[in-house]
């Protein structure tokens, strides 16, 4: 990257609180957000709709290269549009996350999505949310944060979120899915989930969101003047 447009890279497993942290950082600095997980989720969704197997690397890479995807604010929320259709409700569930994690293992798929993610780096700056923002997509990011939390705590948070929406939530099933997804994301050969060498590592297991945000902002302030 030859630009000095600031990027705050926030990586970590699902459920650690990255989404909320990214939102708070984006408000503080007036930066846009790249939700890279949503891109993998939409790709997996598009593949299922088109009946493409989630391990068919060549077809998935071709689909990724031609994905007509757009993020758009609708009713104060960021909606994800695929071919102009709002697919947000289809991609924000456990099943879609799991499918995304499967297509995300494939190197040709990751390569096909690389430039698309980098194109989000625009003035005044970007908060990039994902698994490999600080390691692969934006290796020269201005500030890198790796936000983790125990799988047990992340499962408890997910259960609470679902219950708050009035939905059924089975802790054991959710814990199992989280553990499986972690295993796949952390152990894949290309762009595995791991902290960049120069990332601030935060463990949110016993921290409130305010504590996480304060620590992150303190760190980012040392990097963005
Ligand atoms: O952050 P998320 O739960 O929306 O991500 C869904 C899946 O997408 C995640 O399990 C792995 C994959 N992913 C990835 O491989 N690289 C990213 N930068 C973001 C997500």
Image (cartoon, rainbow, N blue to C red):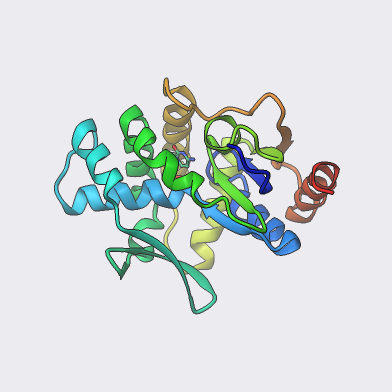
Residue at coordinates 37% horizontally, 33% vertically from top-left? 111
Left or right: where 138 falls relative to 51? right
- Choose top left, top right, bottom left or bottom right for residue 197: top right
Residue 59: x and y, percent?
19, 38
- Quarter of the image for the N terminus: give it: top right
Residue drawn 36% across and 57% down?
Answer: 91
- Compare residues 197 and 48 and report the one nearer the observer: 197
- Decide which of 153, 54 is in the foreground and name it: 54
158 left or right, relative to 125: left
Asked which quadrant contains residue 2, the reply is top right
Question: Which corner quadrant of the image does residue 110 belong to?
Answer: top left
User: On the picture, is 126 further left or further right than 40?
Assistant: right
Relative to 148, say whether 214 is above or below: below
Residue closest to the far front: 2
Q: Is residue 56 visible?
A: no
Front in this rendered view, residue 2 or 49? 2
The number of discs equals 0
Q: Residue at x 71, y 32 (%)?
A: 199
Question: In the shown orientation, is residue 194 left or right of residue 5?
Answer: left
Q: Residue farthest to the bottom? A: 75
Q: Does residue 42 lie above or below 109 as drawn?
A: below
Ligand 1 shows up in the quarter that is top left
Please tell me whether residue 75 is drawn above or below residue 166 in the rendered image.
Answer: below
Whether residue 140 is visible to the viewer of this picture, yes or no, is: yes
Residue 136 locus on image (x, y percent)? 53, 31
Q: Position of residue 19 (x, y in %)?
A: 59, 54
């Amino acid at each position: 990257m030859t630009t000095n447009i600031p990027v705050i890279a926030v990586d970590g497993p699902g459920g650690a609180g990255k989404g909320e942290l990214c939102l708070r950082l984006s408000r503080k600095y007036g930066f846009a957000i790249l939700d890279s997980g949503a891109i993998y989720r939409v790709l997996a969704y598009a593949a299922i709709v088109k009946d493409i197997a989630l391990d068919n690397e060549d077809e998935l890479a071709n689909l990724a290269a031609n994905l007509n995807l757009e993020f758009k604010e609708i009713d104060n929320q960021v909606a994800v549009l695929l071919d102009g259709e709002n697919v947000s409700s289809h991609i924000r569930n456990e099943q879609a996350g799991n499918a995304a994690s499967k297509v995300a293992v494939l190197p040709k798929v990751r390569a096909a999505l690389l430039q698309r993610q980098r194109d989000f780096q625009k003035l005044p700056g970007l908060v990039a949310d994902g698994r490999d923002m600080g390691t692969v997509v934006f290796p020269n990011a201005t500030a890198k944060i790796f936000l983790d939390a125990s799988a047990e705590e992340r499962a408890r948070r997910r259960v609470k979120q679902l219950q708050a929406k009035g939905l059924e939530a089975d802790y054991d099933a959710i814990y199992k899915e989280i553990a499986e997804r972690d295993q796949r994301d952390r152990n894949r050969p290309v762009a595995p989930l791991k902290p960049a060498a120069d990332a601030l590592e935060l463990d949110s297991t016993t921290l409130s969101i305010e504590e996480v945000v304060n620590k992150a902002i303190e760190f980012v302030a040392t990097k963005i003047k």
